[in-house]
Amino acid sequence: MKPLEPAPREMDCVVVGGGAAGLSAAVNMGRMRRSVLLVDERDRFMWHHKLDNYLGFPDGVAASEIRRLGWRHAARFGAQLLLGHVATASRRGDRFLLRIERLPEGGMFGQTPSPSVPRDEEMARVFGEVPEGGPMEVLARTVILATGVVGHFPEFPGRNECVGQSLFWCIHCEGYESIDRVVGVVGHTEDAVQTALDLLDFTARVTIVAGRPEGFDVPASRLADLAANGIGAHPNGVVQYENRGGQMQALVLDDPARTRIPVEQVYTIRGTRATSELARQLGLELTPAGQIAVTSEQHTNVPGVYAAGDATNLHDHQVSAAAHQGNQAAFGANYHLYRPVQRAGGNAADT
């Protein structure tokens, strides 16, 4: 756990992203005795979010606690951990040159750590390992991109405190917590309509708001389905997300009356954008939606580069799936580092 030297150095693997996928990759690369650097930008794992469907935690576990334990786990196997921003990535023959810059205050996306999760001395040291001499460069033999997505939630005062407590987006993750609650769905697409209808399996008190002045972008028949199932639909934008202490209280519409819809929970269905700028710089194949195209074993089209988690075309936004994909990416990266004699038949080609 010594601070990294600011001078360029070579690593077996650089993992970009400190969520479940990146942490899992770092743990497993470390266990294979590879030199590994994990660069973290304080992703959404720093939100006040509790996981109630993660195996082995019957009482639930804070996402930030999973992250804290993951950092300790990776450090145990020799991974070096750095808060920073990978600004550029390029190929250098059969290596990859990554330029790492100082992380802005509060992280790239403004997340703040949950005050309910204590920081031990190890985490304090890790959080201080920011290059002091300006940008640094690392030459990596392999790269694992676990850069995630952005865009789940709108911006409003108190948002970060509400995420995971009363502000959600995934019914598979939080639907159970909506039993008998007053729920508002904000979204104008078919996905939003389906979410509102699916929530009826948990509560009869559901309202949907388009979340934009243009109204809904669905056929009239779908609006009729909502009405037939007792779901009020408002073709309006939202001018205020009332909340207090992490608890959503009301949606205030942009209609002339500034209609106030009381809620206990809100699901925002607005789509996401994969964080794929580094993938573009490295020449990785992307899907039309901008996700990193990978095989079932997390291989990209560039030998030596792997990707895992929500940034890929295989994502399903589940922490358990991300951990599995990070593990798979580590297997691929480790195999890439094998000497030719270690490969089946002595074949030196990357598989």
Image: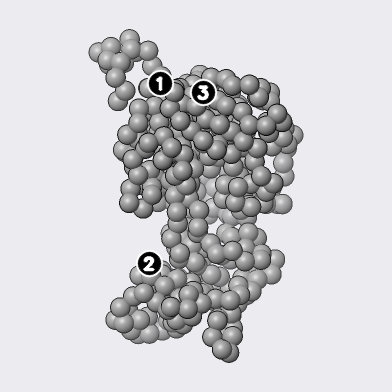
Q: Is residue 239 visible?
A: yes
User: Is residue 319 rendered to the left or right of residue 339?
Assistant: right
Mark 3 residue type? Leu
Q: Nearer the viewer, residue 143 or 170?
A: 143
- Please tell me the numbered disc located at residue 18: none
Q: Position of residue 243 (x, y in %)?
A: 65, 71
Q: Position of residue 21 (x, y in %)?
A: 48, 40
Disc 3 from disc 2: Cα separation: 42 Å
> Which residue in the protein does label 1 denote?
93
Disc 1 vs disc 3: Cβ atoms closer than 8 Å?
Answer: no
User: Is residue 55 rendered to the left or right of residue 286?
Assistant: right
User: Is residue 233 rendered to the left or right of residue 219?
Assistant: right
10 Å neighbourhood of mark 1: few (<14), some, or many (≥20)? few
- Please tell me the numbered disc located at residue 139: 3
Q: Quadrant of the N terminus?
A: top right
- Please tell me the numbered disc located at residue 191: 2
Mark 1 residue type? Gly
Q: Nearer the viewer, residue 56 or 190?
A: 190
Q: Nearer the viewer, residue 65 or 100?
A: 100
Q: Secondary structure at mark 2?
A: helix
Query: In the displayed structure, would residue 168 be above or below residue 8?
Result: below
Q: Position of residue 172 (x, y in %)?
A: 43, 59
Q: Name the quadrant containing residue 40.
A: top right
Disc 1 from disc 3: Cα separation: 11 Å
Mark 2 residue type? Asp
Query: In the displayed structure, would residue 158 be above or below residue 60?
Result: below
